[in-house]
Image (cartoon, grey):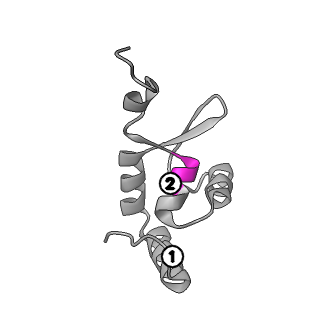
Amino acid sequence: MDGAANPNSELLDGWLTRAELAAELGMAADTLRRWATKRIGPPHVRMGQRVLYRKDAVREWRRDHPAFTAALRAAAAIEGDGIPLPD
């Protein structure tokens, strides 16, 4: 494998784990977990015990659900340490 440390890293380039997405959105991973059980969050897939979010699907979901994006932006402003969200 040409000395590649992780052969899956390139394969999963367009995907985020629940923890990675939570960090990008400035929210708890548990919130994403609750949203998944209620089927109200970004689309995800399960690979065994791993939950993955396709980056393009998350962008589309945020575009199509402006109320969630506005709420996340407001929460980030209140906490002062959230990652800014693009318009």
Nearer to us: label 2 or label 1: 2
- Can you give x and y, in whole percent of width and height, for residue 31 in the image? 64, 61
Crowding at dot 2, Cα within 10 Å, few <14 / some 14-19 / many 20+, comes out as many
Query: So how many labels did they put on this image?
Result: 2
Answer above or below: position of 12 versus 86. above
Q: Is residue 1 magenta?
A: no
Assign the C terminus to one quadrant of the image: bottom left
x and y percentages locating residue 71 in the rendered image = 51, 76
- Residue at 50% from the left image edge and 46% from the top image edge: 43
Q: Quadrant of residue 62?
A: bottom left
Q: Is residue 1 above or below residue 67?
A: above
- Type of amino acid at the residue the image marks with label 2: Leu
Q: Going by the picture, which residue comes out furthest to the bottom?
A: 78
Q: Which residue is mark 2?
A: 21
Question: In what quadrant of the picture does the N terminus appear?
Answer: top left
Mainly helix, strand or loop, the magenta region? helix
Specify which label sits upstream in the sequence, 2 or 1: 2
Q: Residue most toward the left?
A: 87
Residue at image location 36% in from the left, 61% down from the top: 63
Is disc 1 surrounded by few (<14), some (14 to 19) or many (20+) residues within 10 Å? Answer: few
- Residue range of the region highlighted in magenta in the rendering: 17-21
Q: Is residue 10 above or below residue 58?
A: above
Query: Does residue 19 show up magenta in the picture?
Result: yes
Mark 2 residue element: helix
Q: Is residue 15 left or right of residue 47?
A: left
How far is disc 2 from disc 1 in space, using C-alphas?
A: 16 Å
Q: Residue furthest front?
A: 3
Residue assigned mark 1: 71
